[in-house]
Image (cartoon, grey):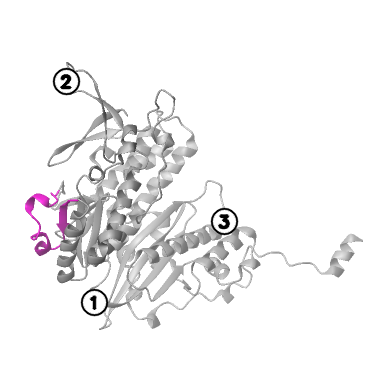
């Protein structure tokens, strides 16, 4: 296997990582990765882990040091992991074989993560808290977990260390939003803050997101080289791809970039050609404004402590250029105090082939229903009710009726919605109180931080249900579009034949 060094620069250290290219073909034209099975995914996906991370009162992160290299490959398979090596140009070249799971091989991720689960199966009965954290809140070698109070947080820490030591795994890069949790960890095993923002706040990067434990908030990392990008198709698409936002927290500010991306693809310019002027007139001002996102501080925690009731609310909306949805978690304590927080969002660019606005609104409703299912499965708190909101009366009329009434496009989507969320409530909200409106239309990045509707939903959402809007009577639309034509009578058909 060919291998080479990769240097990773950071504010504190420069680390060297060796990358092995198991996809390089051998003399037979076949590579090691070509004949290896990748293996199934056995951990939760990135979005799920991040959603759960937003629900811990006491947040804890840690990392398994050199996880792949702690797992031995069976002796009879080690010969497939051969490399050429010499310590200096004067020495003869030696052929070595690697005895551990190797980064760059197709099955490496599965083998490592499956070993973690095997460790839980074998030893987890004595470490209940740690087992649950590894099963639900780990992503490859990162563990993003937490607890509802300090007592459980301390037990969780101790159990994680003890359980993973039984598999010869060592935890390092610990961090928490509370100092007394971090004080229990030796200084050398703590994570070093690696990002310094203009306000002096120090943050750490976890699963691609920047988390500031001091204020317990996410911050947005906009790369400095974004401003230096050229105006070719390659450079603009590369810049847009650097806006990593798995939770959709900055979706209203990024949807304009997605629209520009679609315009670039439609222009059919070559990779290193300058994009048309009409695209440049949109991209250059937006690129400068994206740096305003660095000023955002987004609370990590999405619920209140000692909550006794939880609800989910999904808002959806569409414009002619884009559509999207936003999911809100409402938590209520025993005194009736409630907190509403946007937990995640998603946006889509409208299809290149034009379709009607009601169809786009329905597509946004489908996206909301699918996303709501993902969020419900991710959350470990018990959701009492899930509600959906749209400002499209036509889409509401479709959803509240039998799917068989409508033409194929509408019928298929209505059927999916009704299957995804049976018994859930679809309601009407006016556009000015629909937070998903800013997803579909976009917003100036400098305005996003102060947009209360986006971060906390409409003000009435925090109130009792009796104060919610009661509009949305589908009888107000006596003849919704997309209805199937009524079947002709046999007498009429007979007359037609004559």
Q: Which mark is residue 410?
A: none
* Of marks 1 and 2, the one in the foreground: 2
Q: CA distance from mark 1 to mark 2?
A: 62 Å
Residue highlighted by disc 1? 306
Disc 3 element:
loop
Q: Which residue is nearer to you in this view: 165 or 356? A: 165
For image coordinates 41% across by 62% down, the residue present is 374
Disc 2 element:
loop
Magenta span has 174?
A: yes
Q: CA distance from mark 1 to mark 3?
A: 46 Å
Residue highlighted by disc 2? 88
Magenta span has 81?
A: no
State which region is magenta.
Answer: 169-193
Residue 305 coordinates in the image, percent (x, y): 22, 74
For the residues bearing labels 1 and 3, Cβ distance under 8 angstroms: no
Residue 365 coordinates in the image, percent (x, y): 49, 63
Residue highlighted by disc 3? 356
For the residues bearing labels 2 and 3, Cβ distance under 8 angstroms: no
Residue at the far top: name it: 90
- Does any portion of residue 243 appear in the rendered image? yes
Q: Residue 23 sits in which quadrant?
A: top left
Q: Which residue is nearer to you in this view: 365 or 457? A: 365
Q: Residues within 10 Å of mark 1 (few under 14, many from 20)?
A: few
Q: Residues within 10 Å of mark 3 (few under 14, many from 20)?
A: few
* Of marks 2 and 3, the one in the foreground: 2
Q: Residue 264 sits in which quadrant?
A: top left
For image coordinates 65% across by 68% down, the residue present is 405
Left or right? Give the position of 375 relative to 87. Answer: right
* Of marks 1 and 3, the one in the foreground: 1
Disc 1 element:
loop
Q: CA distance from mark 2 to mark 3?
A: 67 Å
């Amino acid at each position: 296997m060919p291998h080479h060094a990769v240097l990773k620069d950071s504010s504190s250290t420069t680390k060297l990582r060796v990358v092995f290219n198991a996809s390089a073909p051998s003399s037979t034209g076949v590579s090691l990765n070509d004949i290896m099975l990748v293996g199934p995914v056995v951990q939760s996906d990135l979005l799920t882990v991040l959603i759960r991370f937003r629900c811990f009162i006491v947040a804890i992160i840690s990392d398994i040091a050199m996880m792949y290299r702690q797992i031995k490959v069976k002796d009879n398979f080690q010969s497939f992991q051969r490399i050429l090596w010499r310590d200096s140009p004067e020495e003869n070249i030696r052929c070595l074989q690697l005895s551990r799971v190797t980064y760059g091989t197709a099955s490496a991720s599965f083998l490592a993560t499956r070993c973690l689960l095997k460790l839980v199966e074998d030893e987890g009965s004595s470490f209940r808290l740690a087992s649950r954290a590894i099963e639900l809140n780990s992503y490859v070698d990162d563990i993003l977990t937490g607890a509802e109070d300090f007592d459980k947080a301390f037990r969780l820490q101790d159990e994680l260390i003890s359980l993973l030591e039984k598999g010869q795994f060592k935890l390092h890069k610990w961090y928490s939003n509370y100092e007394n949790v971090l004080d229990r960890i030796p200084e050398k095993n703590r994570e070093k803050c690696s990002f310094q923002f203009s306000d002096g706040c120090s943050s750490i990067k976890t699963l691609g997101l920047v988390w500031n434990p001091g204020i317990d908030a996410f911050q947005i990392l906009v790369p400095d080289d974004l401003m230096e990008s050229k105006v070719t198709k390659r450079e603009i698409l590369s810049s847009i791809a650097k806006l990593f936002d798995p939770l959709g927290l900055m979706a209203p500010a990024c949807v304009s970039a997605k629209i520009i991306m679609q315009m670039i693809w439609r222009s059919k310019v070559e990779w290193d050609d300058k994009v048309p002027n009409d695209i440049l007139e949109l991209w250059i001002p937006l690129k400068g404004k994206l740096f305003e996102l660095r000023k955002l501080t987004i609370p990590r925690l999405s619920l209140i402590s000692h909550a006794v009731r939880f609800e989910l609310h999904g808002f959806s909306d569409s414009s002619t250029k884009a559509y999207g949805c936003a999911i809100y978690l409402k938590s209520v304590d025993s005194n009736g105090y409630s907190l509403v927080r946007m937990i995640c969002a998603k946006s889509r660019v409208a299809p290149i082939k034009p379709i009607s606005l009601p169809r786009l609104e329905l597509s946004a409703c489908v996206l909301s229903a699918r996303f709501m299912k993902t969020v419900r499965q991710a959350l470990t708190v018990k959701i009492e009710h899930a509600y959906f909101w749209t400002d499209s009366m036509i889409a509401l009329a479709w959803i509240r009726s039998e799917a068989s009434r409508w033409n194929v496009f509408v019928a298929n989507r209505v059927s999916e919605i009704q299957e995804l969320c049976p018994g859930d409530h679809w309601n009407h909200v006016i556009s000015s109180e629909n937070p998903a409106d800013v997803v579909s239309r976009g917003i100036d990045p400098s305005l996003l931080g102060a947009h209360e509707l986006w971060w906390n939903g409409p003000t009435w959402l925090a109130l009792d249900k009796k104060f919610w809007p009661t509009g949305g009577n589908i009888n107000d639309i006596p003849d919704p579009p997309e209805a199937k034509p009524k079947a002709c009578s046999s007498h009429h058909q007979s007359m037609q034949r004559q």
